[in-house]
Amino acid sequence: MNEPTMQKMKQLKFYGMLRAFRTTIEAGSMNRYTPDEMTAFLIESEWDDRYNRKIERGVKNAKFRYKAVLEELIYNDKRNIEKNDVQRLAECTFIENKQNILITGSTGVGKSYLASAIGHQACINGYKVVYSNTGKLFGKLKMAKADGSYVRELAKIEKQDLLILDDFGMQPLDALSRATLMEIIEDRHGKSSLIVTSQLPVKQWYEIIGEKTVADAILDRIVHVAQRIELKGDSLRKRKNDVEAITE
């Protein structure tokens, strides 16, 4: 009777249940479980499998720059980052509260890694996340305007619980990018969260956005509901390269 049962599990796409059932049979452990225990074990295995696959899909769809996890962050006084603060961010209450996170600091200090690690944790917590390099996103949306898919692309962004805009401010925004940013921020204001990383301090973002009225409107919606993290210290990439050079 076991083989037909496993075939039905496969057809119903109960893959976690199927693996658990097959493993139990192969290990000769069926007699160790009461019927109630076996039922609970199979259901728990299926639940775990679906939960893990959901996380994997979320991480894949997010398209993070780094395979980053909070457990691998480096904490010290020179970096200006506290473990307790990051652990609070890992709870993702900032997403529940529709708040933003602004991460600034010089090149190589770990801004993108930290943003990706927080985003990865948000995926684990069941939130929809998307990561984008700011310049590449604006370029993609310009092309979308040309081929008629602009509204659809904006709708995809709006559906995300957390949008990560990495490397903001690498170059001043032109009129089209400025209007696009305004639309994105307006769509998300009070509805969902944003993480922005930048080499520039927030006070210089006005110059990058340009057109004071629009810049005021954008930053008013971003900054006043944001937690700020200013990373400091030496470049982690440079330190990694130095260590590799020494060990070679």
Image (cartoon, rainbow, N blue to C red):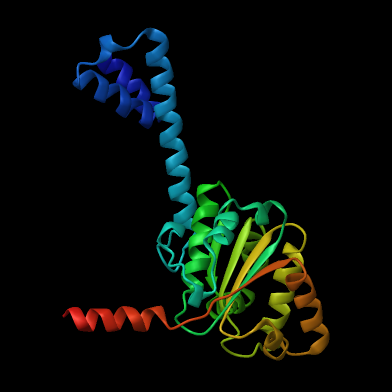
Q: Quadrant of residue 226?
A: bottom right
> Which residue shows up at 44% across the image and 64% down it?
73
Q: Which quadrant, please, contains the C terminus?
A: bottom left
Q: Is residue 135 above or below residue 22?
A: below
| Residue drawn at 39 percent across, 22 percent down | 42
Q: Note whether residue 196 is visible.
A: yes
User: Residue at the right extreme?
Assistant: 213
Which residue does the image show at 25% across and 25% down from the upper left? 23
**Quadrant (top left/top right/bottom left/bottom right) for the N terminus:** top left
Tally of marks: 0
* Residue 55, horizontal then vertical, whole percent: 47, 47
Tell me: 219 left or right of 9. Answer: right
Front one among 65 and 61 = 65
Please give left or right for residue 174 compared with residue 18 in the image.
right
Looking at the image, residue 144 sits to the left or right of residue 11; the answer is: right
Question: Above or below — where is 27 with respect to 167?
Answer: above
* 162, above or below 9, in the image: below
Which residue: 39% across, 28% down? 45
- Tell me: 134 left or right of 35: right
